[in-house]
Every structure is written in C-alpha cells, then in structure tokens.
Image (spheres, rainbow, N blue to C red):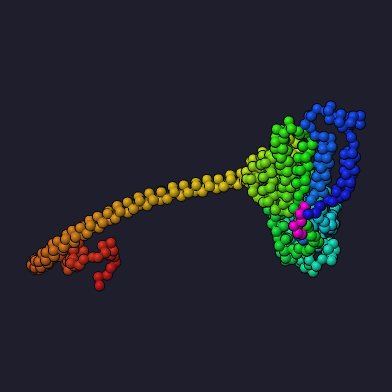
Amino acid sequence: MSFLHPEFLYYMLPPLFILFALLLTQKETHEQFFSQEIMDKLRVNANTLTLKARNALFFLVGLFMIIALAQPVIKEGSVEIKAKSVDVMIALDISDSMLAEDIYPNRLESAKRKALSLLKEAKDERMGIVAFAKNSYLVSPLSFDKVSVSFLLQQLDTTSITEQGSDFLSVIETVQKIQKDEPKKVLLILSDGGDKSDFTDEIALAKKSGITVFVLGIATKEGAPIKREDGTFIKYNDEIIISKLNENIASLAIKTGGVYIESTTSQEDIKRMIQEIERVGEKKELKSQEVQKSKPLFYYPLSLALLLLLIAMSSIGKRGSSHLGVLLILALFLSQEARAGVLDFMDLKKAKEAYESSNFEESAKLYNEHAKESKNPQSYYNSANAYYKQKKYKEAIEAYKKATFDDKYDRAKNLSNLGNAYAKDGDLQKAIEAYKESLKIEDDKDTRENLSEVEKFLREQEQKKEQNSEKNRDKQDDKEDKQKQNKEQDSKDKEQNKEEKKDDKESTQKEKDSDKEQKESEKKEKEQKEKEAKKSENMDEKKDDSKENAQQVGDKKEDVMSDEEEKKWINQLKQNSSSYLYKLNDNDEKKISNDEKPW
C-alpha cells in the first residue's frame, strides 16, 4: 500500500499530535478545586463519556481523515500511454468569392463552421490555420490547444486580407515552409476552387514537397452572385459575376494522394474527411508516458472517521445502551451513504475519463447508472451526450428530456442539444421546436444557425415531396390517359373487327350473288347464242331465198337493185346482226370510220 499524497501525512499529523496531547493532559475546571474522592460522591452518574474519552475519539477521527486525504492506494502495475498525432494544416480561402450566398449564410461562414467542427471532432490531431487569397498567411501554428485555434479562426473574414483572387500555389509554398523538417505533410483546403482550370504547377510542387492535399469544396454547382458589405454585387464588364464551384480543383487532391469531398449541410462530410485523413496521413509519436494503475482505498478510513465522530458526539452509558444499537445502525447507514457518495465520485470520474478517451459506450453506462440512483440532471445530460456520440439518438433524446435543470443557461443548452438529437434522428419538426424553446431562454449563435439549417432542410424536403407528388400525379394521369386510350383503341378494334366480319359476310354474299348472276348470265348468253345461231340459219335461208327472188326479179326487172346497193344492204345487215364470236371485253368497242376503204 502507498499514498498518492503523502504530504498530508507529513504536514498535518505532527500538529494533530501536538494539539491532542495538550487536550489530553488538561484537567476539567472543577477537578482543580475538588479531589477525585469528593467528585465521585458529588457526581451523578449520567452515563456519558468522559472528556478524555471524547477527546481521544476526536483525535482518532482527525487521524483517519488525514489518512483519507493522503489517498491510500494499492498499486496494480503501470501502463504506457503514447501520444500519436497527424499534423494537419487547414487552409481557409477568404477571397471575395467566398462571400457568395449559395451556401447559408455564405461560403466563408460555412467554411469556418466546418473547420470548427473539424477541430472538435479530431481531438487527437495537432492542427494549424492558414488564410489565403492572392497570398497566404499563417493564422495559427500547429497546436493541441483547440480553444485558442478556434478563437483565432472565428476572427477571420474577407477584410483580413485586401488582395483579390485565390492562389493555391502560395498555400502549398507556405505549408512547405512551416513544416520544412517533416517529410510528409497533410494540407486541408476549404475553398470554392477559384477560377483556375489547370493545377499542374500546384500538383508538381505538392508532390515535390511531400504534401498530401485534401479539398473540401465550399460552393454549389449552380453558383451565386458575390455580394459586398454595402449590398452591391461584384461586376465584370458591367455584368454581375456568378461564382460557381470549380470542380477542377479535385485534380489537386486526387493526384497528390488526397481526397476531394463536396460540403453538405450535415457533419457527415467532416467525419468522412477525418476518416480519410487518418487513413492516408501518417501518425507520428509525439511523446509517451507511463501511468500507474492503482486501486483507491481512501473511503475506508473516511467511513471509520465518520463512525467515530458520531460516537464521540453521543452519550453512551448503561441507561443509554438500549440506544447504542440504533446509533450504530444509523452510523453504519451514514457511513454507507458516505461510502456511496465517494463511490459515486469515483464512478463519475471514470465516466468522464471514458468520455474524454472516446469510450462513449462505457461513459454512457456509468453516467446513466449514476443518474438513475441520484436523479442528478447533470448525469442525465452527460449520459445523453455520450449516447449522442454513439449515434444512439433515441436514447439521447430520452436522457435529455430527463435532465431538468434549474439554471437558465443549463436548461437552454440542454434544449439545444435535444434539438440536435431530434435533427439527427430525423424528427425535424420537434428539432425546430426544441431550438425555439432554447432561443426563448437564451439567444445563442450556434443554436440559431442550427435552427436555420434545419428549417431550410425541412423546406427542401417539403419541396421534394411536392415535386414527387406532382410527378406521381402526372404519372397517374398519364397512366389513366393510356388506359383510356387503350380502352378506346380496344373498342375501335372491336368495332373494326365487327365491320370486317360484316364486310366479309357481305363480300361473301356478294361473291355468291355474283357467282349466281354469272351463272345466270352464262345461261342467258348460251340461250342467246342458240337463238342467234338459229336466227343466223334462218337469215341464211332468207338470203338464199332473197337471191333467188332477186334473180327472178332481175330477170323480170333490171332496174330494181344495183350491185352496189346490194353490197351496202348486206353490210348493213351484218353490222346490225350478232355473230357467233363472244367478246371478252365489251367496253373496248372499235369505232367504224366513214373513210374506211373497203379493201
């Protein structure tokens, strides 16, 4: 066993011995005037402790308390702790283009918030700040003092440097000078990329200097005009400039072995950037230290001192012996309560150490156990923070609700963190309500910015929902129109099929009728031919008869019909009569010319 603070023993025990030695040697006032024999006869037995006994108990109480202050421990070995870190230089673009408001409230303020979040999240890394526009300037060297670095970072604005433009080559040269003794360096640039398209010189210098460049793009592809403090916009050739995200800067990060990430409204971009820096960057050992592990024992002498103090302040005698049990039980109870209080202190210390070492699960467990036993709002608040770090947002919300503070500042801070947990859990409406309640109590810049971002994100979600609903309605309308068209087409097809069937029936009937008519016409033609054949035979017979008669007549009368007239008459008969030939094309009738020669 050993003592962590033995100086308490060296400086407090000697005065204690001297003081109680004087007290024990002193006599009571009445003993100076009466002998012990007389005093025994005069004294009424009140069953109380004597002065010497009570002083002896007080001496023991003081002795045990001093031993407790010296903190006795049992050593359990030592542990070597090594401090490793990736040195990161943060380069912040503060040129006029960073005043564009395509990111709320503007690019510069958003970049500063991202850098502050990086300082909070990356607790084990040394970080420095460089501001640049046309030239680069060191704001803070590499340091573990995140509070000082954050303070210097918050003071930056575009008025800090009057030069215009963004020169990334000067940033790399500055980092090279700052870390000239380091073979490998990490540079994180927060910028909109400027207006440069070729980063060949910057890439070559970064590779030569051993600098791995990481870029966080702080702008949007749509861009925005650059607004001055007086409300006017920056113009070029009498036209307002629209500054956009220059994605060409991604080549500077990728070709030097780093990573390019576009900024988002959440903290996921920062967390991802830290992961990539820790993965790519080389951690170096800054210092190592052996820490002694020990088991504390101070609560044993402290509990014993409290018990003896209770006995010393009580009267114990034969008549009071019946009360001794109650007093002892009460003393034990009080000692247990005191021991519990001490153990609570130890648990809270362990919980705090676990939180600081990023062991959030153990920290949340210890804080939660203490909160359930003590109903302490601070313990609920601390357990909620530990749950939040584990991304267990529902548990964090419940713990924040149980943390009911009386102090106005603590209550506002708790409500702000409750809003953060609601936002991470996806309940944006409740997050807004928590932020507003916090701002009613105390106006805080971070809370107001978080409220603005959540409200903006909620509006964007509502707009997306409306757009999606409109698209769904359009799709539904298109679907209904298609269904209607399909139905109309089906009905048309059905009608067409019916008409086609009807036409087929009619055509079939027509074919049948035409066949029937053709047969009848053929039959009639056949009959007509037979009649014509008979008629022609009769005509021939008549011709012969007419010839004979003509000859007879001619014999009798020579001037009755000349030969020429007879030919004309026969030709006329032939034209008006039907022959035995059947014309296949009735419409192609040949016209007879009057000038036709007879040969």
Q: 586 or 142, which is in the foreground?
A: 142
Q: Please, what is the dominant secondary structure of the magenta stretch?
A: strand
Residue 192 placement (x, y as % from top left): 74, 55
The question of residue 76 being in magenta is answered with yes
Residue plotted at (78% across, 64% down):
284
Name the residue located 78 percent from the left edge and 40 percent from the top edge.
308
Using the rendered view, name the quadrant where residue 445 is placed. top right
At a point 76% along the width and 34% down the height, the residue shown is: 316
In this picture, residue 365 sits left or right of residue 130: left
Residue 370 visible in the shown view: yes
Give yes or no for residue 517 being in the magenta stretch: no
The answer to whether 419 appears left or right of 581 in the picture is right
Residue 16 at x, y = what percent?
87, 43
Please give left or right for residue 126 compared with residue 524 in the image.
Answer: right
Above-or-below relation of 364 to 407: below
518 and 191: which one is in front? 191
- The location of residue 375, given as percent across then percent down, is 68, 39
Query: Where is residue 345 shown, x and y percent of the image?
Result: 74, 45
Up the image or down, 154 lies above or below 306; here it is below
Res. 133 visible in picture: no
Q: Residue lying farthest bottom?
A: 599
The foreground one among 287 and 178 is 287
Exactly how many numbered labels are in the figure? 0
Q: List the single residue furthest toward the front.
A: 37
Image quadrant containing the C terminus? bottom left
Q: Specify the quadrant of the image occupied by residue 441.
A: top right
Segment tinted magenta in the rendering: 73-78
> For residue 524, what is the image quadrant?
bottom left
Q: Where 26 sits versus 301, above or below? A: above
Residue at the spot 80% in from the left edge and 46% down from the top edge: 68
